[in-house]
Amino acid sequence: MAEPYGESPLAAHADVLTDASVPGALHLSEVSFTAQVALRVDPKSPAAERIGTALGTMLPNQAGQVSRTERLLVAWLGPDEWLLVGPEGEADRIQTAVGEALGDEHGSVVDVSAHRTIIEVAGPKAPELLAKGCALDLHRRSFGPDRCAQTLLARTGVVLLCRDAAPPNYWVFVRASFARYLADWLRDAAAEYHQKR
């Protein structure tokens, strides 16, 4: 059955992530076709509060903070910018709810679902693997669950989000046009874990 959005950026490259995975130590996979909506609004405006009510969680107001509901993740990207991430096919619903809450106030709500794909990097070796190409301190005290950052990974601009610390689980949001390059880099960077088995 064909995917409703065509082929994911890593569909033809899924074996690269599978090959990089090491049972019990590291798991890599693509999380494709998530709904992703970019939101810009003044965080101190009445619209921001209405949007939080409509989403079921207030917009994070601290750098790198993430808030969640059962079906939605809201990542702080800047003082007046958030990335809303939901299940496949939910972008229109999210846009409509946020647009209605925004009303006539200044702001923007844009479906960016096709802009990025997500590579999940999970397992005990995940922080070590990511640290090979990322300057952030990924220790759970510094970058624990529900934290995010816009950063570079292997010289590629990404949004890195920590979903869990035990075991470590990260989502790497990467532009579709760089996804294959990053998958290849992750495979090469994970090669040493295969040699230690």
Image (cartoon, helix red, strand yellow):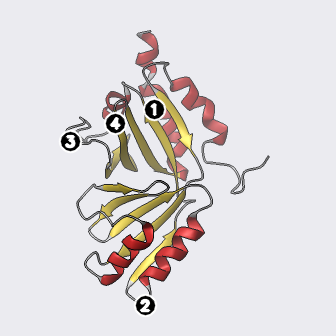
Q: Determine the secondary structure under disc 4.
A: loop
Q: Depth check: give the residue in front, 58 or 88.
A: 58
Between the residue at mark 1 and the residue at mark 2, the CA separation in whole angstroms equals 44 Å
Q: Depth check: give the residue in front, 6 or 100.
A: 100
Q: Nearer the viewer, mark 3 or mark 4?
A: 3
Going from N to C along the chain, the mark reached first, 4 or 2, is 2
Residue 142, numbered label: 3
Q: Determine the secondary structure under disc 2.
A: loop
**Residue that badge 4 annotates:** 133
Residue 104, numbered label: 2
Would residue 28 be found to the left or right of residue 49 on screen?
right
Measured as percent of width and height from the top left, residue 95 is found at 52, 72
Is the C-beta separation of discs 1 and 4 under 8 Å?
Answer: no
At x 54%, y 51%, the residue is 177
Is the C-beta separation of discs 4 and 2 under 8 Å?
Answer: no
Residue 186, numbered label: 1
17 over 54 or under it: above or below: above
Q: Amino acid at mark 4?
A: Gly
Between the residue at mark 2 and the residue at mark 3, the CA separation in whole angstroms equals 39 Å
Between the residue at mark 3 and the residue at mark 4, the CA separation in whole angstroms equals 17 Å
What residue occupies the far right of the structure in this picture? 1
Going from N to C along the chain, the mark reached first, 3 or 1, is 3
Going from N to C along the chain, the mark reached first, 2 or 3, is 2
